[in-house]
């Protein structure tokens, strides 16, 4: 007669761990959930018992005990999601997902659409522990809508409205614009224009200010800025307007690489050579800058690091709900290539 298969071993429970450690169930629970109010001897006993018994906590019960869900939301707009493969958002998103994976968390994608109130209801509905907001259009009402959200929120880039009320991770956009404009000045350019981003975005406001201040410090005139919408077509249209008003232009600082690609197209169509006739510097140091013709000097943003840092800031706020807004500003650098 064949031998019967062995009876599967019953999974150890929290009660088993508590009994083996000689503590109450509540104490064992506090130790395994990282509550720091348990004496050291009890902590050691519970951890040894859990290891000896092969105890594996129930994730749902553990989250409930801590009042946590071990999941965070990622907020994008539908347009940003559609453009993601070609957008600079791909890099911070890569950094954020890597940071989330390392911490065994889950990420929930939320789309900010016309009904932004629905997004607020979801965040207030105890579905996630916090939210990362990575949207290009800070002209949305999200910073205002989510200011008093039930969960902490961290933005990529400084919201332009009441920034002191929000937590965000950003690069030094003002300093980056200064680096770019000073590079053009040092290259001997004297009529240096700019293609700025939408002025309802903090990053665009700061980049415009950095360009303007460097020109003033060197006693150079500041041509009237033209504005684009951070797209290649927007950059092309802005470049055409800039050339119409300043045909003597010999340098231009463009507030994004994508807009700079459109600007390069218009410069080539007008018969102007880069950098011989017009020097061009972009912003982001994306693959577009590296593969442009000619390869384009650009302000580097540590985008992947910014995404990772957003997760760190969010977890800090989740762990300490009473903490005030947290802001992290990373330095910008200039990647020099052949367009200057």
Image: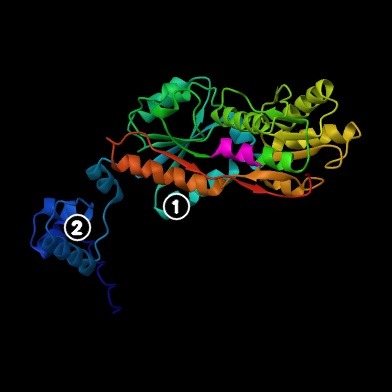
Q: Which residue carries the number 1 mark?
A: 101
Residue furthest right as drawn: 271
Q: Judge by depth and name the residue closer to the eye, 214 or 149.
A: 214
Give the foreground label among 2 and 1.
1
- Residue 320 position, x and y percent, is 28, 40
* Residue 5 to residue 78: above or below: below
Element assignment for label 2: loop
Q: Tag 1 or tag 2, which sits nearer the N-term?
A: 2
Quadrant hosting residue 144:
top left
What stretch of residues is rendered in magenta?
Answer: 172-179
Q: Is residue 269 left or right of residue 299?
A: right
Q: Residues within 10 Å of mark 2 (few under 14, many from 20)?
A: some
- Magenta residue check for 124: no
- Residue 122 position, x and y percent, is 39, 28
- Magenta residue check for 174: yes
Q: Which residue carries the number 2 mark?
A: 13
Residue furthest bottom as drawn: 1
Q: Residue at x 26, y 72 (%)?
A: 6
């Amino acid at each position: 007669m064949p031998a019967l298969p062995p009876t599967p071993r019953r999974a150890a429970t929290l009660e088993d761990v508590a009994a083996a450690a000689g503590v109450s169930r509540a104490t064992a629970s506090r130790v395994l959930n990282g509550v720091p109010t348990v004496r050291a001897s009890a902590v050691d006993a519970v951890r040894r018992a859990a290891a000896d018994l092969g105890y594996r906590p129930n994730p749902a019960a553990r989250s409930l005990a801590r009042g946590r869900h071990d999941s965070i939301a990622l907020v994008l707009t539908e347009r940003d999601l559609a453009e993601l493969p070609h957008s600079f958002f791909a890099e911070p998103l890569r950094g954020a997902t890597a940071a989330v994976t390392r911490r065994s968390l889950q990420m929930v994608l939320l789309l900010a659409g016309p009904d932004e109130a629905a997004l607020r209801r979801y965040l207030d509905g105890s579905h996630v522990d916090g939210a990362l907001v990575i949207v290009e259009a800070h002209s949305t009402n999200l910073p205002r809508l989510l200011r008093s959200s039930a969960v902490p929120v961290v933005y990529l880039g400084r919201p332009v409205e009441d920034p002191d009320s929000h937590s965000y991770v950003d690069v030094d956009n003002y300093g980056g614009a200064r680096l770019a404009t000073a590079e053009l000045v040092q290259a001997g350019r004297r009529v240096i224009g700019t293609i700025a981003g939408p002025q309802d975005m903090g990053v665009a406001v700061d980049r415009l200010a950095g360009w303007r201040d460097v020109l003033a410090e060197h006693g150079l005139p500041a041509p009237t800025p033209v504005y684009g919408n951070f797209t290649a077509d927007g950059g092309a249209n802005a470049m055409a307007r800039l050339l119409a008003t300043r045909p003597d232009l010999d340098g231009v600082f463009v507030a994004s690489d994508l807009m700079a690609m459109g600007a390069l197209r218009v410069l080539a169509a007008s018969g102007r050579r880069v950098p011989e006739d017009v020097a061009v510097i972009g912003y982001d140091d994306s693959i577009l800058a590296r593969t442009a013709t000619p390869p384009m000097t650009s302000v580097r943003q540590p985008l992947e690091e910014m995404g990772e840092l957003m997760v760190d800031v969010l977890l800090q706020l989740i762990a300490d709900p009473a903490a005030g807004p947290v802001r992290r500003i990373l330095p910008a650098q200039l990647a020099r290539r052949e367009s200057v």
